[in-house]
Image (spheres, rainbow, N blue to C red):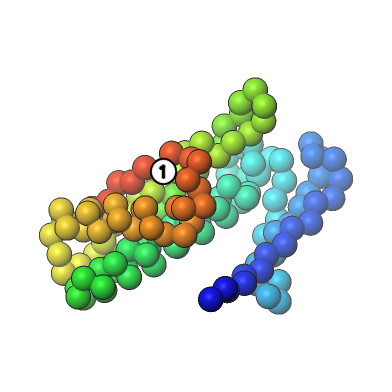
Amino acid sequence: MKILRYASAIWNGPVPTGTGSMSLGRNQGTTIPFSLKSRTEENAGTNPEEMLGAAHAGCFSMALTSILEDAGLNVGSIETSAKVTLEQKSDGFYITEIHLISRGKNQACTNEEFVSYAERAKKTCPVSKLFASAEITLDAALA
């Protein structure tokens, strides 16, 4: 089974002063602006790296929920955030690290079990597999 999802981006002008937008969904219903400033300065809007972090956090949370359900556990809620590190090296920019922070609330398991399930989700979620070239770390616990 193959499932297609859609996104697009437009960039206008030179990198230092130009602007772009990223659109999500088949109908391109959600549009998010970005610029060099939003990639290099704090609190200047969103950027591709934050979008990737959001995708990873969402995918991880769904994978962890699936693993908990497969173990026969009632699932409460899972809240995950991602910190994505963009690093400049001699031959260009790289996403070198992604740190996931995940908290489970109202889970039917111990903290140790939750951490074990979370480690498995980190290894098996499709976005983690995509980011295999980056160091992916995890801080998981019950809230």
Crowd band around label 1 with a 10 angstrom C-alpha radius: few (<14), some (14–19), many (20+): some
Residue farthest toward the right in the current orientation of the protein: 13
Q: Nearer the viewer, residue 122 or 20?
A: 122
Q: Residue at x 61, y 26 (%)?
A: 89
* Corner quadrant of residue 78: bottom left
Q: Is residue 93 left or right of residue 112?
A: right
Can residue 97 be seen in the rendering of this structure? yes
Q: Residue at x 29, y 52 (%)?
A: 119
Q: Is residue 141 left or right of residue 22?
A: left
Name the spot of residue 103 as percent of width and height, x first.
29, 57
Can residue 142 be seen in the rendering of this structure? no
Q: Is residue 122 left or right of residue 37?
A: left
Residue farthest toward the front in the current orientation of the protein: 1
Name the spot of residue 10 as percent of width and height, x first.
79, 56
* Corner quadrant of residue 75: bottom left
Q: Nearer the viewer, residue 137 or 1?
A: 1
Q: Residue at x 38, y 49 (%)?
A: 100
Quadrant of the drawing holding the C terminus:
bottom left
Residue farthest toward the left in the current orientation of the protein: 110
